Image (tube, rainbow, N blue to C red):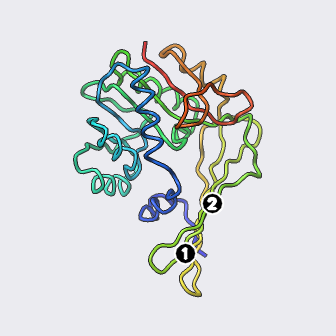
Amino acid sequence: MLATNALYTDLSEYYDLMCCDIDYLTQSQGIHRLHQLFGNGGKSHLDLACGTGPHIQHFLAAGFDCLGLDLNSPMLTRAKQRCPSAAFMLENMCHFALDKPVDLITCFLYSIHYTGKIMALKQCIDSVYRALSVGGVFCFNAVDKTKICNISRVSHRTQHLESVFEFSSAWFYQGQGEEQRLRLSICKTTGEQKQFWQDEHPMVAISFDELEALLSPYFEVHKLAHDYQRIQPWQMDAGNALFLCVKR
């Protein structure tokens, strides 16, 4: 068994396998539709925590000028290979600045929680506000700390070359404070040999009421159901949501 505290860096080559069940096209099209309905009609796009660039790939196909931002250099290397016509920044999403504003900023896969602390999340929101043009849209998904089930886990299995990979992830919140954990594990089986990686990422824990209070001074905020195919209001018993924020 091999344990690591830098799973994303060490296993960046496996990241796309870990996310192979994600419908990047539907997610991208869903946010594009929201931008068409609520945004300013512009075509410049910034994807925060872009990873290996799968969402950017679809925004490029939709005619956007795309910029990806991530703190992980190996991820950005793969993103550049996937999306050579996009631009990329090796930067922290909590404090970044652009030379000129963009019309749409996205942050997929609950990556807004990687800010880690409430103060850093505030800095991220401020950076996003300054980076958006008037009438621009900020879209992201989030999980409400008060609705996290610590025994719930998402898993899937896939095959790559001669190996079988099993991936699992789970949220954990101890019930107080501003930190929750994202617990990740990968099991790679090649013949009779097994390798195992596990990691925990500190994530910011916040309720939707608290998050809306942070966003409201900057944006017109809409909480929507976590459904990229239909535009529906968020149901109060749901633990996740899409946040659609329009710059005032």
Horizontally, residue 40 falls left or right of residue 149, namely left
Q: Residue at x 63, y 60 (%)?
A: 168
Type of amino acid at the residue the image marks with label 1: Val
Q: Position of residue 197 (x, y in %)?
A: 58, 67
Q: Which residue is mark 2?
A: 168
Q: How many numbered circles does the render carry?
A: 2
Q: Position of residue 150 (x, y in %)?
A: 75, 48
Nearest to viewer (mark 1 / mark 2): 1
- Rendered position, 1 above or below 48: below
Q: Residue at x 43, y 30 (%)?
A: 33
Mark 1 falls on what kind of element?
strand
Q: Position of residue 77 (x, y in %)?
A: 31, 56
Mark 2 falls on what kind of element?
strand
Q: Which mark is residue 26?
A: none
Q: Nearer the viewer, residue 35 or 104?
A: 35
Q: Calculate the distance from the C-alpha at mark 1 to the C-alpha at mark 2.
A: 14 Å
Q: Which residue is mark 1?
A: 164
